[in-house]
Image (spheres, rainbow, N blue to C red):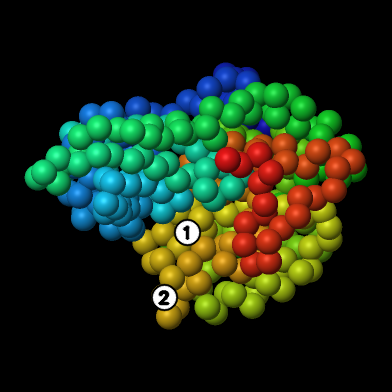
Amino acid sequence: MFETLRQSLKTGVVTTSYPQTPPDVSAHARGRPEIDWANWKDARPAAAICPTGAIEFSAEPAGRSVTLDLGKCIFCGLCADVDPAIRMTSQCELAANSRHRLRHTARYQLNDDGTQRGLPAVPATARANAESIAPAGRQLQARIRSVLGRSLHIREVDAGSCNGCEVEINGLNSPVYDIERFGIHFVASPRHADMLLVTGPVTRNMELALRKTYDAMPAPRLVVAVGACGCSGGIFGQNYATCGGVDAIIPVDVYIPGCPPNPHALLHGILLAIGRLPSGAPLQKRSAGGAAEDPGAV
Ligand code: SF4
């Protein structure tokens, strides 16, 4: 007993102070690919090698339109291997409250040989990344109590994931991330939950279970799609066995990209989701079977 206490005192506090401080992520961790849009000469090799179709381009008479979709990206780094205009970063705070905010599109004029020339339309930078979560972190407990009247309870549903996301979600309950310091707890029953955290591309076998879990939750309820699979179907996409992402089945409030997203990325997304429940305001109108509508979207 005394030895345990002695060890605890010797170890000191290991819990991260995120979000008051920036995420302490290894420089070797894989985060989003960063594209030098202005000097990107040819998107075709990267698009051809991307295993999930996260880099798309369309040929138009006036030029080429190129899109990077972080909701599909699994951070494999193959595009960076074939294209010097792309480099992998360790940036993990990528959650967004609408699917289109994860898509960044640039339009180019073309040279005769098909390479890209001018950049008439510069893509919006990752606005979701720049959204400050520090205020959300500071106001979190007060917001939870004012809106929900108690701590936030999360029900996690594995809708067909490889369990990579589950390993990272487990980390949220470790002493390092300690999600309970925010008054946030994981619960076993959807009837006790305010938030549904869903991983996996939603296999056809889990579709009904996911619908029933969502229907069993009391309002107001939040849904967070976790990982590339949850956001878009990821490497599996939509096929005979998978539905192609959580928002194909139930409305989603926040998307957390990554394969898998690390605990900092998960915390960022959960804080973002809670910030979307303004006190006293009705829940945003949702489109059937799709993402919650985002009035601030452009
Ligand atoms: S990191 Fe991998 S999945 Fe992401 S855009 Fe590049 S090639 Fe595609």
User: In front: 112, or 267?
Assistant: 112
In the displayed structure image, the side of residue 207 where residue 280 appears, left or right: right
Quarter of the image with the N terminus in it: top right
User: In front: 143, or 279?
Assistant: 279
**Is the CB of the residue bearing disc 2 within 8 angstroms of ligand 1?**
no
Label 2 element class: loop
Q: Are marks 1 and 2 in contact (CB under 8 Å)?
A: no
The percent position of residue 226, horizontal first and vertical second, equals 54, 52
User: In front: 257, or 29?
Assistant: 257
1 or 2: tag closer to the N-terminus: 1
Residue 219 disc label: none
Relative vertical location of residue 8 with respect to residue 109 in this rendering, above or below? above
Residue 232 disc label: 1
Q: Residue shown at 77%/27% (left/top)?
A: 139
Question: What's the amino acid at mark 1?
Answer: Ser
User: In front: 106, or 159?
Assistant: 106
Label 1 element class: helix
In the displayed structure image, the side of residue 6 where residue 144 appears, left or right: right
Quarter of the image with the C terminus in it: top right
Q: Residue shown at 52%/63% (left/top)?
A: 245
Can see residue 61?
yes
Q: Exactly how many numbered labels are in the figure?
A: 2
Question: What's the amino acid at mark 2?
Answer: Asn
Residue 239 disc label: 2
Relative vertical location of residue 97 with respect to residue 177 in this rendering, above or below? below
Q: Residues within 10 Å of mark 2 (few under 14, many from 20)?
A: few
